[in-house]
Amino acid sequence: MSMKKMTIYGCFLVVTMLSCNKPDIRLDNPNDALRPAAEFARNNYAFSLLSAAIVKAGLEEELNKPGALTMWAPTDAAFNRIGIRSPADFDNYDTESLRQLVLNHVQPGKLMVESIPLGSVNNRYDNAAGNNSWLARIDITAVPTNPNRTIRAYVNGAQVGIDNRYNIPLSNGIFHEISEVLKYEDASVREWLEKKGHYKVLIAGLKHFGYWDMLTDDKQWTIMAPADSIFERQGMTVESVTELDTAVYGKRLFGAYIFPVRFFVSDLGLFKLKLFVGSGATVELGVYTPIMGDESFSNGITPIIGRFNGPGFFVNKTFPQESWDMVYTYAVSYPDYRSNWSRSNHLTRNGCIHHLDGVVLLPYQAHD
């Protein structure tokens, strides 16, 4: 492909845009006697696990001292979704790992939700763990003419202020409830996949088709990652994949699982690209990119595709001009961030990994 075409086929990330002995401090009932962050969490039954993590990590004094901070606060329900159901479950963490987990939810300075630029994603802020937090704030009003706007904010893909519980004043900052525990590992996407141990087929394919060495730290990536068991159900194993003739099978067979840009699941509803699919019809996409090394094909994600009701992942001819029948494979199940959070939005140093529930291309579909 010529450089001119390569320029045209750039990457598109699309955006349209009681304890009975404890006082019940409801987030929507401001307390005149403002408390500091750790004390507020300790005295609110909805954040008992967050409080336990703060105490076990030895951060209670630090988070209670005067100053200005922003606390992104997962509820007990959010911890439950990642398998933490009691304070004893934190015994599986060493002190430093637990400190990092807590401090990833603390941001220096006092940030009100309204200070996040509206209609934007990828607003970078430093957190107290020394890592980046990525904030977004969007208008999701279904009917553009509706004067009653619905505005949502996200941090690393987690929704801020469930039931409007945000901008809660503390004596040392501001407190926002968030929908999920933020996930971050100080690793590259390659190290993350290798460490988990159940992505061997994907890794073998990425290596065999020349993508593995491309996933360097100087760029940001999103990896859609089917586990070994999902590939194996389709007859694809480490051995069978490494035996494929790369002169016969297109690079899209495994290049389809890579997006050369980092995105969270929540970002997919922010901007939308309308893809023309023939006969005057269009389809709205959340992300759509030509596949590196096989640019006549593209991978994308759309909220609804074919018979699949939910976020879907697909491969098709790049910018089809005839009909939607040019889709090479119908979408496979993509994690819904509301119900499968433990499997999506895994943030690393150089990207994000989302579990994928199916194989998007079989070898015969990439036979050139």
Image: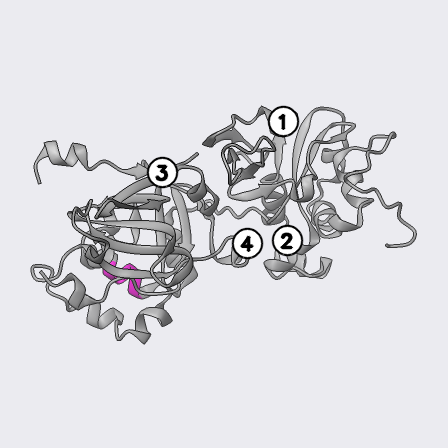
Residue position marked by numbered label 1 in the rendering: 111
Residue position marked by numbered label 4 in the rendering: 338
Judge from the rendering whether residue 346 lies leftward or rightward of residue 102; answer left or right.
left
Picture coordinates of residue 91 (x, y %)?
67, 59
Using the numbered discs, state the Cα–Cα distance from disc 1 to disc 3 in whole angstroms. 26 Å
Q: Describe the element under mark 2 as helix, strand or loop.
A: helix
Q: Earlier in the sequence, mark 3 or mark 4?
A: 3
Residue position marked by numbered label 3 in the rendering: 14
The answer to which quarter of the image holds residue 229 is bottom left
- Does the stretch in magenta take in 152? no
Residue bounds of the magenta highlight: 201-205
Q: Describe the element under mark 1 as helix, strand or loop.
A: loop
Do callouts 3 and 4 mark residues in contact (Cβ within 8 Å)? Answer: no
Using the numbered discs, state the Cα–Cα distance from disc 2 to disc 1 in whole angstroms. 22 Å
Q: Amino acid at mark 1?
A: Leu
**Quarter placement of the C terminus:** bottom left
